[in-house]
Image (tube, helix red, strand yellow):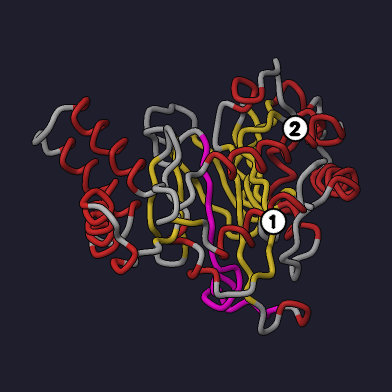
Amino acid sequence: MPGIDTISLYLPKEKIGNYDYMENMESLLTNQKTVTYKNSKVTSLSGNRRNLLITYNERGVTLKGSLPKFCDKDSIDLLDFPKVHQALQKLSDEFKMPFDKAKLRRIDIAENFKMNQKPAFYYPYLGNINRYRRLEQNNGLMYQQGIKKNGIKGIVFYDKLDELKDNKVIIPIKYENQNLLRYEFRFFSRLPQQIKVDEVTLSSLQNESFYNRLIKYWHDEYFKIKKIKKMNINFEVCKTIKELETQLLLEGVQAKGGEAELTEIINQIYKAGNSSKMQCKRMKDKLKTLCNTPNLTYQSEAILELDKKVTENSIS
């Protein structure tokens, strides 16, 4: 079952009460420094508590980091619902502040999948998704919605073991020599608007119904991704000129790197001003129809395997 990974939250001063957090933070944090933000007249202080980054000033406290790693620094597993209360209690006890009242600004829902192939094998079969940008990464694939640095929300696939090796983290025995694909759905901002509630606080995660809604987002966004089909090109079975033309076109798509690569080329054509928005849409529609030609295209085993993993780990 998917669980919680990275969170970002803000606890305003008025919800902290009479506790002198400004003074007591000095004894709790390491790597402390002064931070001045652009367009802000307030000077902040920041530091670390294990893996968490804490920034605080006279207005309140901001906390960012992986919640499961805060509870167990050697774990790469996620924080499932039964462990949420324990994690929130640990936060409040260590900092002596009511973090359950903090506003949740970001949350990542994720799961690790043991796959038959290396994670990179699956990326080419994951195509575009409406209103997201598809961005290939050195160690994975990212989809981002929104124009800011991280956007409003994002989808990420990457090799979890490669990430651990890059960060010189010891791989748990149960994951040694595994093909471990991490799939994350990230709410970067505007949680209340996206989830359609008045407010989202850290205590919201203790509500099982709310928690399950997050898992459902994780599931549903994956299935919105257009899956790239494999091509079954065989000129020997052609019976008409139309069939020959279709197979030649499909071979051309394949030679140019596939549907996702050609879709990006069309995007660049539009950005360069070489064609209108309507013409580019027609190009994409034509490409989509071509790449879903019956009998000449079929769903890959990679996607069938990944679909099954996501379905099996979702809320029924």
Q: Residue 116 carries which label?
A: none
Q: Residue 195: x, y in percent?
A: 66, 25
Q: Identify residue for label 2.
A: 213
Q: Residue 276: x, y in percent?
A: 15, 27
- Along the horizontal axis of the image, is 85 left or right of 285? right
- Along the horizontal axis of the image, is 42 left or right of 182? left
Q: Is residue 38 above or below residue 48?
A: above
Check residue 165 for magenta coloring: yes
Looking at the picture, which amino acid does disc 2 mark?
Answer: Arg
Q: Quadrant of the C terminus?
A: top right
Question: Are discs 1 and 2 less than 8 Å apart at CB?
Answer: no
Residue located farthest toward the left when viewing the structure as drawn? 274
Residue drawn at (71%, 66%) of the image: 76
Highlighted range, magenta: 153-171
Alpha carbon of mark 1 to alpha carbon of mark 2: how far? Answer: 20 Å
- Along the horizontal axis of the image, is 71 left or right of 139? right
Q: How many dots with numbers?
A: 2
Quarter where residue 258 is shown: bottom left
Residue located farthest toward the top when viewing the structure as drawn? 198
Q: Is residue 268 above or below residue 1?
A: above
Q: Residue 120: x, y in percent?
A: 48, 69
Q: Nearer the viewer, residue 184 or 114?
A: 114
- SS under mark 2: helix
Mark 1 or mark 2, whichever is nearer to me? 1
Looking at the picture, which amino acid does disc 1 mark?
Answer: Lys
Q: Identify residue for label 1.
A: 308
Residue drawn at (75%, 32%) of the image: 213
Q: Residue 55: x, y in percent?
A: 59, 42
- SS under mark 1: helix
Quarter where residue 199 is shown: top right
In the rendered structure, which disc, 1 or 2, sits on the residue that comes first in sequence? 2
